[in-house]
Structures are given as structure tokens and as C-alpha cells.
Amino acid sequence: MNQLHFLKRLDALILFSWSLAVLAFKLLVSNVVVAKNRDTIASPILLERGDNVKSIQSLLSAQDDDFESASSDYECNANASYSALTNAITLEDEGGVPTTAVLHEVVGTSMDVGVKKLSERIAEIGFTQTIDVTTLRPLFSTRSKYQDIEVYESKFYGKILVLDGVLQITERDGNSYNEMMSHIPLMAHKNPKRVLVIGGGDGYVVSEVLKHNSVEVVDHVDLDEEVIRTCEKYFKWGKGAWSDSRVNLRVGDGAVWVRNAPSDYYDVIIQDSSDPFSVDDNGSKTLLPSSVLYTDNHFRNIRRILRDGGKFMFQAETFIIPSDLSGIHTWRLQAMDIGFSSVRYGTVFISTYPTGQIGFLLCEIGKNHFDDDSELLSETQIRHRLIEEAGMETTYYHPKLQISSFDLPYWVHKSIYGSTEVI
């Protein structure tokens, strides 16, 4: 009897040791990250011993057809529906039999069941940032003709728009980039009437442009109508952006619109585009669809359709990433070569953009509307006050940024302008 008791205790000890080994393996696996450059990344969820297939399935949904069993202890497969990765976790069913459950729609790395993280990795500089979201499933998800569209919820950042797995805008800090992209060029023009917005399907730039009472016409051209309809439903700035009688929404290719537009027509053009290229771990550059909006031909057409004194504002990436900084320098020279008299890089602080900083290039044609910065600041203060008095205040942009946003760190200034002289 003593020998039998000893063997039972030995079996229990072996089983306990095996459980610890499995748990250690899960901890190791949970730190494995499979990533694409500038894309959402996915890793396993760590589950406690005793969790079963039935309970995990109920977390996702009783109707989740993607829940199934697999034969291996751990595997990652592409999940095209959500531009994420499939995660396989070994657990035990209610009878104690080891089973591998495959969980779909899991984005990011989580140490707690029910917590999902949106992550973006910049391979070129080995930088990754992550935001917790509050639900395992997106609030909304669809596939348009061009891309995956998802809306998530974050405790701090509010609703988040994600396209093809890449975070685009949040309710918390969408104001910084979009207010600067809109008010900087409009305030730089003394009397902007006709405005063209290329891209910006979330509608934020359009909603800011409409705060200027001098604006009579806003032509908004974006390729993906599904993005527009999604933001119209889920984001407050999208609810009225396209209902204003001054706005003409055109679903189509921005480059084609510019090519066919009449000469000397617009006062201000704002190009709110996605990244024109990506760089992988090996340093290889891949041109993305929006690269067409950064070509010589496109810039020439932009120059042609602007009136004298016109302003062209476009998204110009971050100076932190070397390939982006090189691009800023190149785009500035490109714009100068085709006839813009002034091309300056300005900066914006935005916590959800990788590295926390993004910028723009403001390109101007012909004579400046203002004699000096003091006149520009004075005029901007008056116009900004009118916006506030009309109940349409800004939360990031203010008049002093009209001048100070172009002040850069010395090394950045030299990299962009190729001169040690501070302008």
C-alpha cells in the first residue's frame, strides 16, 4: 500500500512538473511577435491552465465560424479577413484532454483574456508602439474594394480607425494632424475661396476647412467610399462634413482629378494621403499606391491648377525615420524645381503616429500675402477669433503655431534645407 501511495504521489509530481513546463512554453511563445513593416502585428493570448475550448469560444461569439480545432501545439497562419494572424493555443477541454484551439481576429499581444492590442512596427528603426483596445472584436469591420476597414474602441483614445491593419486616426489625437493640415495653409492665404482636398476619407480635414467663412467651394476627392461611409457613421467629425452645401464629394482617384482639373482654379489644395512607400528589415523600399501623389507629374498638375498666391499642403512623414527624412528633402527640391517659390516643412506632435511626430510641406506660389511674420500673426489671430466666436474652436491649432511649427531641430533643418543657415 505504501508503494502504491508513493507511485500515485510520483505520478502527481510528474504531472505537476509537466504543467509547469507547458506554462513556461506558453510564456515563451507569448513573446514571439510576427510582424510586417508598418502593419498590425499579432501574437498568442496566454491562457491559464484549465481554460477550455467552450469558454474561450464564448468570448469571441457563439456564431464565430472561425473557431476550430487544429492538430499542432502552435501555429500562425495568415487571416486575410482581418489582416491579422491566426493564433493557436494549446488548452485542455472539459475532460482534461489536450486540445489546440485556433482563435481568429486576435490583434496584438495580450497577457489577459479579453484584452487586445493594436501594434505598429517600423522595421527600419526597430520601433514598435502598441495601444490597448477594449474589445476582442472590432466595433465595425468590412472589406471595401481596396482595403480592410475596422473601427476599434480604446479606453483612452476613444474610437480608432484602422485600414489594412494600420492605425489611421483616433478620437483623442486626430485633432493635432488634421487641424494643422487645414488651418496652416488656409491662414497663409489671405482670402481662400476654392479648396481641393485629396484623400482624407475620414472627413476631419473637410470639417476643419469649413470653419473658414471665406471658403465657398470644397471639392473633396477620395478613392474609397466605404471609408467615408464608415467615418460618417462612427466619428463625430464625419457626421456633418459632407452635408454642408459647399462640399462636393467625388469618389475617385485624386491624381486623375488633378490631371483633369482646369488651370488657375483653386486657392488652396490639401493632400491628406497615406504613406507613399515602406521599408522592410533589409532596407528595401516598396512603393505604395499613394506614391503616385508624390511624383513630378502630379506636382506639376497641382502647380498648374493653383491660382497665383495659391497654397499646396501635403503630408510629409516624420523626420525621425531616415528614409522619411530623405523623402522630405527630395520632395521639397522637387516642388521647388517645378515652380513653387517657397516650400517649408512644419511639424506636428501626435502620440499615435509612430515616433510621436509627423510633418507637412507647405508649398506656395508667387508673392506672399503678408509682408512679414508679425502681419501674418496679427491677421491669423483675428480670423481665429472669428472661428472661436462662431462656436467652432480648435483644440490643437492656435495662431502662434502658424509661425512656430516651422521651427525645427537644427539637425533636421540642415537635413531638409541643406544649409546651416536658419531661416
Image: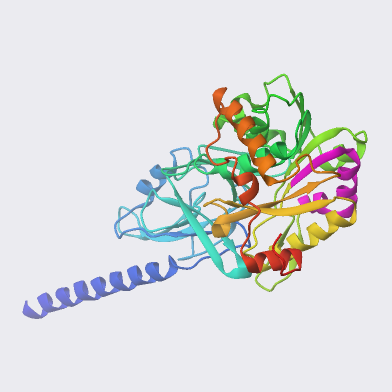
Q: Looking at the image, which is closer to me, 262 or 125?
A: 262
Prevailing secondary structure of the magenta residues: helix
Residue extending farthest top: 245
- Examine the rendering and report whether any part of residue 29 can be seen: yes
Point 67% across, 35% down: residue: 379
Is residue 53 depicted above or below 143 in this figure?
below
Q: Looking at the image, which is closer to me, 15 or 1?
A: 15
The spot of residue 37 in percent (x, y) is 63, 62
The spot of residue 276 in percent (x, y) is 74, 55
The spot of residue 11 in percent (x, y) is 21, 74
The quadrant of the picture occupied by the N terminus is bottom left
The quadrant of the picture occupied by the C terminus is bottom right
Point 51% across, 65% down: residue: 33
The part of the image, by quadrant, that contains residue 418 is bottom right
User: Magenta segment, which residues?
Assistant: 290-313
Q: Is residue 410 left or right of residue 277?
A: left
Q: Is residue 312 magenta?
A: yes
